[in-house]
Image (cartoon, rainbow, N blue to C red):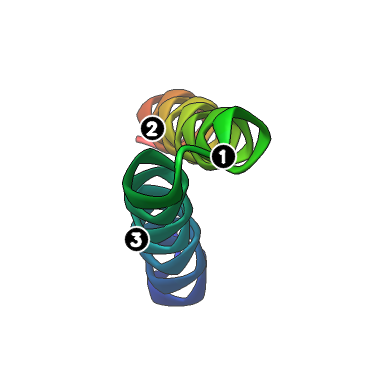
Amino acid sequence: MGLDDKIKNAAEKLGGKGKEAAGEATGDESLKAEGQGDQARSDLKQAGEKVKDAFKE
């Protein structure tokens, strides 16, 4: 996994956590769900990158 990918995935996950927290604070279920989706997408990307790295070794 390249450093750029790690940074992008971490930023996406952090942004998702922020959206989720904002949605929770304001009662906006749509924003909360969007934040959770961003976090899940980031986790999947990280898992995919780890699999690619495993095959490179």
The type of residue carrying mark 3 is: Leu
Q: Is residue 41 left or right of residue 2?
A: right
What residue is rendered at 40% in x and 56% in y?
Answer: 22
Disc on res. 49: none
Disc on res. 50: 2
Q: Circle 1 is placed at which residue position? A: 28
Q: Earlier in the sequence, mark 2 or mark 1?
A: 1
Place of residue 56 in the rendered image (x, y in percent of width and height, measured from the top left): 46, 37
The type of residue carrying mark 2 is: Lys
Place of residue 28 in the rendered image (x, y in percent of width and height, measured from the top left): 56, 39
What residue is rendered at 48% in x and 30% in y?
Answer: 36
Crowd rating for badge 2 (residues with CA inside 10 Å; few <14, some 14–19, many 20+): few
Nearer mark to the viewer, of 2 and 1: 1
Q: Earlier in the sequence, mark 1 or mark 3?
A: 3
The type of residue carrying mark 1 is: Asp
Q: Earlier in the sequence, mark 3 or mark 2?
A: 3
Quote the CA–CA distance across marks 1 and 3: 18 Å
Disc on res. 14: 3
What residue is rendered at 32% in x and 49% in y?
Answer: 25
43 up-or-down from 25: above or below = above
Question: Count the marks: how many?
Answer: 3
Rendering quarter of residue 11: bottom left
Crowd rating for badge 3 (residues with CA inside 10 Å; few <14, some 14–19, many 20+): some
Nearer mark to the viewer, of 3 and 2: 3
